[in-house]
Amino acid sequence: MVSSTSPASSRRPASRWGDGPTLSRRSVLAAAALTPLAAALAACGGTSTLGESSSTRLAMMNDNAGWLAGYQSAGEALQKVTGYDFDVNSIANNYNQIVKMSIQTRKIADVVKWQSGYPLTELVRGGRLAELDDVWDQAVAQDRVDESLRPFVSVDSHVYGLPLYKSHFAFYYSKAAFERFGLHPPESYDDLIEIAKTLKGNGVTPFSAQYTAWQPMCWFEELLTKTDPEFYLALTSGQAAYTDPTLLDVLRRWSELMANDWFTALDLDVASACGPMLRDGTLGMVPYGTWNSGSFVANGVEPGEHFGLFNLPPITRGVEHTVIVESGVFTLPRQSPNHAAAMDVIGEWLAPSVQQPWSDYLQDSSANPNVPVRNPAVVELQEQLARTEATPLQRFYESSPPQLVQTVLSDVSAFMLAPSRYREAAEQMARHADEAWTDWNLA
Amino acid sequence: MTVSASPARTAAHPTPAGPPPAAPHGRSLKDRLAASAFIGPATVFVGLVLLLPMVWTIATSFTRYNGVTMHWAGLDNYTRLLTDPGFGQSLLNTLLWSVGSLVLPVALGLLIAVVTQGSRLGTIARIAVIIPYALSGTATGVVYNFMLRSDGAVNQVLGTLGLDPVDWLLHWPMNTVTMIVASTWQATGINVVLFMVGLQTVPSSTIEAARLDGASGGKLFWRVVFPQMASSTIVVVGMALANSLKTFDLVWLLTSGGPGTASETLALTMYRQTFLLSRYGLGAATAVVLAIIVVAASWLYLRRSLRPEPA
């Protein structure tokens, strides 16, 4: 701000920076006082970065910055079909909270990446998401989506999300270790135990497990669903208790596996530590999401050459084959700035010409069953799933209220470090599950 | 430290030749408006960024709010918090952090300041201790994660020496003790600086007088020097106390409060309830309890330390 030429200022000595306009104290103070106000007004009136769309680009909120190149590839294909592509805004921290807050305003992106199952229900309860029944029906009519995914993306029989991908949770296995000792992917749980014994006897660590964040879920849901899939469904929907003998049996079995010293240290990073161990044949198997293939490749561990994938066979004899499925979803906020255009774009998301570059980038299965996956390890898994007619089950993370999932997984994490105290762990899980269901039902 | 209210502090600009200061009630409207213009922006700023969020947090602590729907919950959140065994563990860990932060960084800071004072090599030693303070807690966490995980640098060194690896971060209370030691590495530097300032304020004449009276070594330090560093000690201990009660970043990066919630501090409990579990009401109640503890601990400590000198 330029000062006024007051008599007081004219008497001042010339500034050592020259004789140009000088700042009076009053001007500086006024500017200082007005700056926060101006900033606040600008923030209130300006365009939010969450909802910044242009005439041909739709703002999209996403929590995985690592997928930017994939979104760009799919976006280019989308633009050829619809005239629109994505302007991706990746938010790594507190994504859920930011979406929940911003979706209540008009400062929301046109398309929001979210989770299926209960987290989706949580957003729908707030009345802020648009129904996608027509989009879904059209995709089914065009044979662009697996109808079996509908329950995962529906709330009260209406569709609110379109699948982003279709990942599975399975066991990565070391080609080097299996070939060295003449092993093959197990056809039964007994086979798995024999494989583990052989590997351990030859100095190879049979399994990896991680105790942080959501990762305890990998073993927890595998052992649970392969022991009793019906019980898994009852447990996750609140119809069975965490102190049920079936769950105690699962935890006891897991504690016995750990007592055999068959696991890596529980704080090893999967991609950078376990991946190279698989490649080198010093680690036998890693239960994890198939979407992790790309991270293994980034660490020099190639699908087909260094690792394969298999689905864990049933533990209880006579129980059907099941597989854990995960699918993130695209949702459309009711108040999105370019709602009609966003609906058009979402309508073409599952088109083969869009899904092929997206699947190639992820190195994982598309939600469109007619889009071939080029990752040989995932192909191997898909062949096994087709051969065994494995029933898809939604993964634990989306199968119960978010508060229950977080607290129970925290308890599972504690159990992994004190496996002999599995009864106490189950009681703790039951207490936290009761609290979470109460919260959920009161919300 | 003892503080006496000197006449010079209470007198309003005693200028012998100038006119007496005007009484507040005698100020003109113009003066009042001018004064308001000066303090107004600061008052509005503090109100918006400090007081309003505080009132909002207290109000939220009486609700059941998941970020989408909000219901009145009365005292439910506080009842739930105080009956949760995890909250007791969180309080215990916060207490461990407070004791550990008072004992290790403060004692080490004092020791290093005293030992290195006046020595040329001491300057190098002090710089080595102070530099970690310039690092953020996050950077410190990343470094220690690299060092302390099962396949980390420390265990690799132990392995080359033929020793068994140690689960530094996997079990409580080992993980909490390890993290307090890691925190000491970073927190000691500022204490050294503050104690150095305190040492420089001790008049050399006092020390000379004590020496003439036969004091030396430990007796000279504890009876003469240390009492005169009271102002520095109050600041150092006060900061260590408040910071330890707010411990978050290092624990979040190294164990995320785990296994389970075994190494959680109150600040982590607040974060987990709010941002991971979307229990904003319970998170707000934790924040209120934590704020009460921090204010009460600081007030009790400072009230005792800044007790006025008896007349």
Image (spheres, coloured by chain):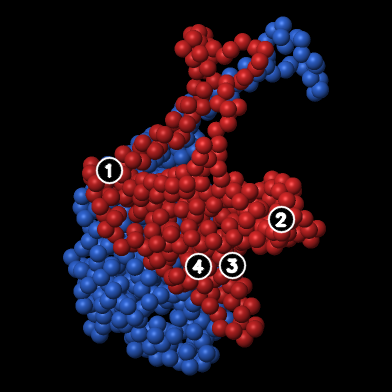
Chain colours: A blue, B red
Tell me if label 4 and label 1 are in contact, CB under 8 Å.
no
- Which label was assigned to residue B177? 4
> Can you give x and y, in whole percent of width and height, for residue B224 in the image?
65, 53
> Mark 3 falls on what kind of element?
helix
Q: Residue at x 39, y 85 (%)?
A: A259
Give the number of the disc on residue B62: 1
Q: Chain of mark 1?
A: B
Q: CA distance from mark 4 to mark 2?
A: 44 Å
Residue type at mark 2 is Asp
Residue labelled with disc 2:
B213
Q: Is residue A340 or residue B284 the one in the foreground? A: B284
Q: Where residue A360 sits in the image (x, y, percent)?
A: 50, 62
Residue depicted at x 28% and y 68%:
A428
Disc count in the image?
Answer: 4
Kind of residue at badge 4: Val
Q: CA distance from mark 4 to mark 1?
A: 35 Å
Pointers 2 and 1 within a single chain: yes
Give the percent coordinates (x, y) of residue B25. 46, 12
